[in-house]
Image: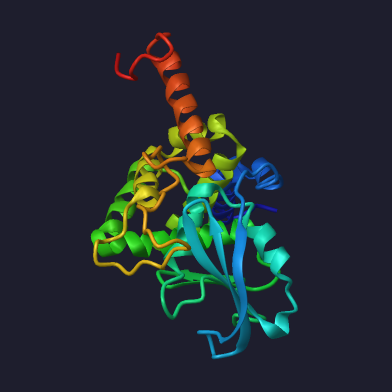
Amino acid sequence: MKIPAIVILTLAIASEAKDQETLKTHFRSLYGRFGQESTTEVEVVSGPEDVKMRNGGVAGKQWIATCGRYRFKLTIQDSTEVELDQLVQTIEKLPGPYIRACEAVSDEGEDGIAVYADLGGASAHGGKTYINIIPRANAITIAHEVGHTLEQVARESDPKILDKWEEAIEADKISVSDYGDNVRHEDLGEFAQVYAVCLDAGPEHLAALEKLSPARFALWEKILRASPPRDAPRHSRPTGDAPRACTGSQPHSLEPPCSCCLRFAARSASIRLNASMTSGGQRKLGAPAGS
């Protein structure tokens, strides 16, 4: 029996699409050990307090936690029966720089990282003022929502941030994931997740991600370390002073530096050194990167 040419063409296109590698498939082997060696440490400093949660006014309990120089809220709907320790352990799997998003969603009237019994079929929602998850959501899911939160925070200072992201997608010429292909802000969320996985896995994986997707990589790092607008509300801190917030993405002058900054700075230095030795020959240790 002769197979019609249109059928052959359709099968060929489908096979080609299936074989196309995405960033998520490329780094899929790293996902299973995400957060297992994380140095992120969360300390609960107060609570619980009975609250009505923002999404539907359901009854919940709220705690205040800190991580390095970040201060944020943890809120759990009563009916979920999720223990606080479970939520803390999940957050501690996130890379240090991603904790910034926890603080971003913890201003007055916000619930920080909030656990709900149900989100209408979704595992999580993320935005400028909220990161909501269901009990089975893991740290990898939260890393995706961090992308949405920090993108919307960055959009306050740069309204064209998503236009720039779309340009980065075109420049990189590689898909993050099938889900990310649907719309640009989901592409960003998926990239934030892949970046978190590579950051957690080590400098060689972060360098590999940068090589595969250089435009997205550079823009996401700008979003990750961007300072909020000067008039943006800031959550009060445990002490009377209000020190400059640690971005977790570069060394800072505050003493002592927090563990997330030290870890990220060490990895960044390793990446720069490896890149220099690979592309431009060896240089003296301790010499400026451009020397």
Q: Nearer the viewer, residue 76 or 212?
A: 76
The quarter of the displayed image where residue 75 is located: bottom right
- Residue 107 image point, x, y percent: 42, 72
38 vs 153, left or right, is right
The residue depicted at 59 percent of the width and 65 percent of the height is: 45
State whether residue 67 appears in this view.
yes
Colour pattern? rainbow
Q: Nearer the viewer, residue 113 or 244?
A: 244
Total tally of numbered discs in the picture = 0
Q: Nearer the viewer, residue 63 or 45?
A: 45
- Residue 196 image point, x, y percent: 54, 47
Q: Compared to 134, does 276 lie above or below?
A: above
Quadrant where the image shows the C terminus: top left
- Residue 88 image point, x, y percent: 66, 61
The residue depicted at 36 percent of the width and 39 percent of the height is: 253
- Residue 206 image point, x, y percent: 51, 36
14 vs 272, left or right, is right
State whether residue 182 appears in this view.
no
The residue depicted at 49 percent of the width and 25 percent of the height is: 270
Q: Compared to 214, does 276 lie above or below?
A: above
The residue depicted at 41 percent of the width and 49 percent of the height is: 246
